Image (tube, rainbow, N blue to C red):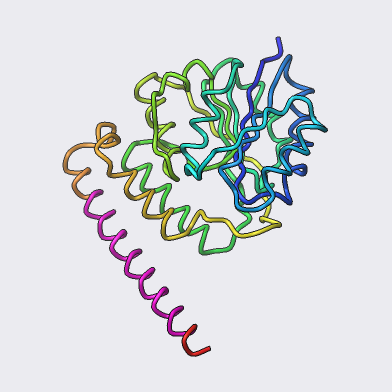
Amino acid sequence: MKPTVSFIVLFYRDAPTIEAVIRPLSEILKKHCSDYEIIAIDDHSPDDTWAAIQRAAHKFPKIVPMRNETNLGVGASFRRAVEATQFEWIGYTDGDDQYETSDLARYFPLFGDHDVVTGDRSPRAEGWYRKCVSLHFNFLIQCAFRLSLRDTNSALKLYRGSMLRKLSTWDAAAFYDTEILVRLKYDFGARIVEIPINHRQRAQGAGAGVSAGNILSILQGITTPRLQLYAADRWGRNILNNYCATLAFGVRLLARIKAARTRTDSKAA
């Protein structure tokens, strides 16, 4: 029997890529699902993203358009969209058109034996710096929470809806993805499987994944008391917390140096 899926697309400053994401996603869901909806949520973008979502909703009748009244952050935006879902499975992807949604065809046969299906971007399409940051982050997650995934933050996932809806809250910013996986695994015994997926470079704009704000948010998420309950032994937690604190200090220092250089260059110009 074909599944029913509520699929969330997280948009922020993604006006040029909305139809490029929605059209193939609609086609793959129509083919493999008995019923589906696409929740297209705009996190209060300052560009034409909301207008583009509304135009897409006229073309694709399964779209449920949503817009946050203020910018909530990616994790909080995802939470609001999850609360609006109605079907058996909940999926999500980003609105920047870096993922091949046709890869979902390989997700659906895995539903019977798993509660979460997630993708491993193999290879990732970004430059060496972002790949190194991602490798480092995923290594920290494996050490801290024994979450044996190569690509925790891959934005092409499908969750068993009844399980995901049991989580009352999660990180409002960039750490939400990892927190959900950790808590589903340890609180509900979720069976998680990871498979290789395609990935392409962003065609429009610049991603915020390795911004100082996002890195600090992730480091804070790893060490938050809520997640420490799931971490390794006390000795390991102390090492991890000190390491993350040192990294956070370095990131803040580099951000200040960069800001000072920018001000100096502006005055010189």
Q: Is residue 79 above or below residue 3?
A: below
Q: Position of residue 179 (x, y in %)?
A: 39, 35
Q: In terms of depth relative to the viewer, which is nearer, 149 or 51?
A: 51
Q: Is residue 73 above or below residue 113?
A: below
Number of marks drawn: 0
Image quadrant of residue 260?
A: bottom left
The residue lying at 25 percent from left, 49 percent from top is 240
Q: Position of residue 29 (x, y in %)?
A: 74, 25
Which residue appears farthest toward the right when viewing the image?
Answer: 59
Residue 269 lies within the magenta run? no
Q: In terms of depth relative to the viewer, which is nearer, 212 or 50?
A: 50
Q: In terms of depth relative to the viewer, which is nearer, 125 or 261?
A: 261
Which residue appears farthest toward the bottom when viewing the image?
Answer: 268
The residue lying at 42 percent from left, 80 percent from top is 261
Q: In terms of depth relative to the viewer, which is nearer, 240 or 36?
A: 36
In the image, is 160 to the left or to the right of 106? left
Q: Is residue 131 above or below residue 27?
A: below
The residue lying at 72 percent from left, 18 percent from top is 33
The residue lying at 17 percent from left, 39 percent from top is 234
Q: Position of residue 3 (x, y in %)?
A: 67, 15
Image quadrant of residue 201?
A: bottom right
Asked if residue 196 shows in the view, the reply is yes
Q: Which residues are magenta?
A: 240-265
